[in-house]
Amino acid sequence: MKGWLWAVGVLGVLLFVGGPDGHDKRIYQTFWDLGHVPLFAILTVAVCRLPVCARLSVPVLAVVCTLLVLAGGFAIEWAQLLVGRSFEYADVLSDLLGSYIGLSLYLALKPVMRPAGRAVLVILAMLLVLVSLKPMAVVLADEYVMREEFPVLADFETPFELTRWDTNLAQLHVSREPVRYGEKSLRVDFMAGEYPDITLRDFPGDWSGFKSVRFSVYSTLASPAEMVLKIYDRQHASSGYEYADRFNRELRIDPGWNDIEVRMDDVSDAPEGRNMDLENITSFSLFMERLEQPAVFYVDALRLSSK
């Protein structure tokens, strides 16, 4: 019993202390988020073993567990805001999955449970475990595709590429038209705001063997627009993300397709007082400055080139 209490204590503390930040790779973040599942599975078993709950019927017990998890899950997410973390509805869903796994196993192991019912509950628990592991499976599958396709960084032809991107005041969708190459592109809906942006966070970061980075942007606007490209390396964080310590370039985006090429020498020379570490590039961003009206763009064929 003490071992379970230790596990609950450690997992509970890790909800608020340590863990990935906004610049860590998605595989680390996804693995960390899985901690909600065993924590609430253990807590649910502990609650079910209380004398007051042991006398409840299965439907009532399921409702009680659901309500307790929703209350506890939302309370945890709100409390995480106080320590600088974000509110994630997906974490509450993970809490529910963990609770239902724990409830299924608790009921399956009751001595009065018939063999057929026990088998159904064990199968249900296994299915819920597989559901909880789906985000990790998606990330692992896309990691494999991403490294197989390199030096293509994003072409939006595979189903899970959106997990590589972060957004601010923007929504992303895979689109079948317009496209520059292949069959799909990325639709970017920028909202009005000071700095709407999209950022590619997950990609092979060693760009040292390439001459340029290329991509295409399609504008649905009737007149030219200004878009800013930002690239930085791992060392950039130690500068406090200073403007002068990264690559910045204003791009004129005309209506229709724009094919853009940036020389790697320019990226290397961009930081003030040092060279960009081309072996450890960590971020590629496109953003607008002080966008007054929503705007739609399409991005396609982001890749590194040896030419």
Image (cartoon, rainbow, N blue to C red):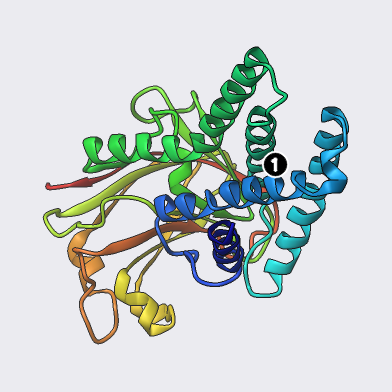
Compared across the picture, whether 93 is left or right of 6 comes to: right
Compared across the picture, whether 307 is left or right of 37 comes to: left
The kind of residue on which mark 1 rests is Leu
Q: Which residue is mark 1?
A: 96
Which of these two is toward me, 215 or 133?
133
The residue lying at 80 percent from left, 34 percent from top is 62
Total labels drawn: 1
In the image, residue 107 lies at what x, y percent?
70, 31
Q: Can see residue 190? A: no
Place residue 147 in its image quadrant.
Answer: top left
In the image, residue 35 lies at what x, y percent?
54, 53
Place residue 266 in its image quadrant.
Answer: bottom left
Which of these two is toward me, 262 or 208?
208
In the image, residue 103 lies at what x, y percent?
69, 36
Which of these two is toward me, 188 or 32?
32
Q: Can see residue 294? A: yes
